Every structure is written in C-alpha cells, then in structure tokens.
Image (cartoon, rainbow, N blue to C red):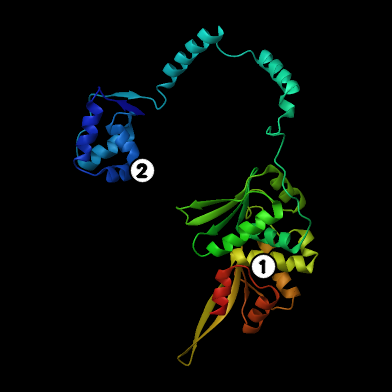
Amino acid sequence: MRILFPKGEQNKFINKILSFISVNDAAKLCHLSERTIRDWRREKFLADKNAVYILCKRVNIRFPHNVKEKDDYWYAEKGSFAGGIACFKKYGRIGGDAKYAKKKWHEWWKREGKFKSKIIKGCKPINKPKFSEELAEFVGITLGDGGITNRQLTITLNYIDDKEYGKFVASLMKKLFKAHVGIFFDKKGSVNRYSISRTELIRFCTEKLGLKKGDKIKQQIDIPDWIKRNKLYSIACLRGLVDTDGCVFNHHYVVNKKSYFYKKLAFTSYSEPLRKSVYNILKNIGLNPRLYSYRDVRIDSKKDMEMYFKLINSHNPKHLNKWKK
C-alpha cells in the first residue's frame, strides 16, 4: 500500500524524519535505497505505508493522520484509460484485430522479413564438441559446482578463493562451446557465477552428455557412462570434481607431546552414486581411497597424495598452493 499526503505534506513529513536520522539510516531501516528516500522527500513518488510505520516507530512520532491509502498500482487504471482514449482517437478502435495483424505480418515476412539477416530464427547455435578429456573435465566441474535450468548453465565459484580458477573455467567453457560466458558477481554470497544462456547448450548437456537439470542431490547424480568407460575421461572428470567440490587440508595429531602435520584430500558430495564413482576411479588408478562418513571420499597417505597430484593433478591454484606449502 501507498499513502497519499496533501500537496507539500509528504516533503514536510520526510524532512521531520530526517531531522532525527540520516538518509542512509532511513534507507537501511526500510531496506530501500537512499535515492528512494530522497524521491519521497521530493514528492516524486508516494511513500510506502509499511516503511512510514517503521520510520515513525524508529524516531518515536505518530503515524500521519491526514493521508489516504492507495494500492501499489493505483495509477494503472487512470493510465490505461488515457491510453485507450489516445488509441481510439488515432485508430478509431481500442485493441487490435488479431486476424488482420496476423495477415499483415505474413505479408511482411514474405516480402522482406525472411531476408533480414538480424532476424532470430530459432535457438542460437553452439559448438557441439566431440567427447574428449576437456569435455569430461567440464562435466566434472558442472557436477561439482554447476547448475542447469531450462535456459542456462551456471558454474558458481567463490569470489576470492577460486578467482584464478574461475578464469580457467570461463576459458574452458568458451573454448568448448564457442559461446559468450557471462560473469556475474553476487556480493551477498561472495561468489562469481559463470553462465552461458543457450537452449541448445542445455539440450546438448542433457541429451548428449548425460547431465541433469534441477536439484543434483534429490536426483542423486552420477558420472555419465561415456566417461566411466574411458580411463582418461574418468581422470579428467575426477579432476573437475575435486577442483570444485574437493579440498586439500592439514591433518594434525600429537604423539608423545609432539605435533605432526600431513596433507589429506577430501571430496565431498551428498550424492551416494557420485561418491562411489569417485571412490572407484581412485581405486582403479592404484590409490587407496577411504569412504569417510556419509559424504566424503578421502585420500590419507602421503604416498597416495603424491600419486594423486602426479596422475590427476589440479587446475585450481587453491589446491595446488595448499599441496605445495
């Protein structure tokens, strides 16, 4: 709801509020921008009823009594009526003739529309790469930190820790699909989102690569069969998975009052089929992984850690730096 003051009174009311608190504080209290508060002061827009209640409570003054309540879109009826009058004056009718419009569109299409190069005909194409180690690694990255909707594929990475790795991911996506990769910073989550918005890419990922749209945990995702059947693809996919949903950490223990530290690696997922597939790949290349609790696959020994970084390695500088320290 909005509230309508008599002319000049909204300006007086907002100035009274701002004599107690700053514009910035008022904006924060109402979860609005400072510009909105200033627009109310200038009487450019009607003030929000709930926001006015909050401000009155904050500075301990009474809610204004000389106001009228208006719906959020109170002006729509007036505006649509004016638009209807203007349309009638110009065309002699209100609303269009659908059959007539369709007929004229077909005439335009046959005459010139179909010859225009900038007309979008169907979905924008993408490059559809053949199965490869790079494509398998992309699948691993997507299974780890990716999300797929009907129109968009997005990889979400930490803004600080994975900043350098994000450059690799964006470059890989662009190289594989020859499409623009949008990079969006989410300040609230402190993450960067690397996205391609192409319907053809979603079809390719779901129909050809075996990836799934929607909630990965509910669907208990797994590594696609075309990757499992190939050792090199399996290693590349595993690298993408661990680079996104894995970590290298220090294990600390004390014996006879002496502290010891050594590196371990953990891959975390709440999808049981995915955890088992990661475990089997590590086992098949000669390592001794361990299923830890209900969510982790771990590598414990120094020998296995050295073997992991020799055979699989990482494209994520965060992991490499932790390993080399």
Give the x, y percent position of residue 262.
Answer: 55, 82
Q: In the rendered view of the protein, which quadrant contains the N terminus?
A: top left
User: Is residue 278 at least partly visible in the picture?
Assistant: yes
Question: Left of 198 or right of it: where is 52?
Answer: left
Who comes first in sequence, dot 2 or dot 1?
2
Q: Amino acid at mark 2?
A: His
Percent position of residue 301, x then y: 62, 82
Q: Is residue 223 visible?
A: no
Task: Work out whether 181 lies above or below 124.
Answer: below
**Measured Cα–Cα span from mark 2 to mark 1:** 43 Å
Which quarter of the picture shows residue 24? top left
Instruction: Give the quarter of the image for residue 29.
Output: top left
Q: Nearer the viewer, residue 209 or 271?
A: 209
Amino acid of disc 1: Arg
Q: Position of residue 21 (x, y in %)?
A: 22, 44
The outermost residue toward the right is: 229
Task: Tell me which residue sits at (27%, 33%) in the image.
Answer: 41
State the mark number for residue 239.
1
Q: Secondary structure at mark 2?
A: loop
**Residue 225 vertical position relative to residue 100 in the rendered view, above or below:** below
> Neighbour class for label 2 at 10 Å: few (<14), some, many (≥20)?
few
161 above or below 42?
below
In the picture, the disc for residue 31 is 2
Residue in view at x 50 percent, y 82 percent: 252
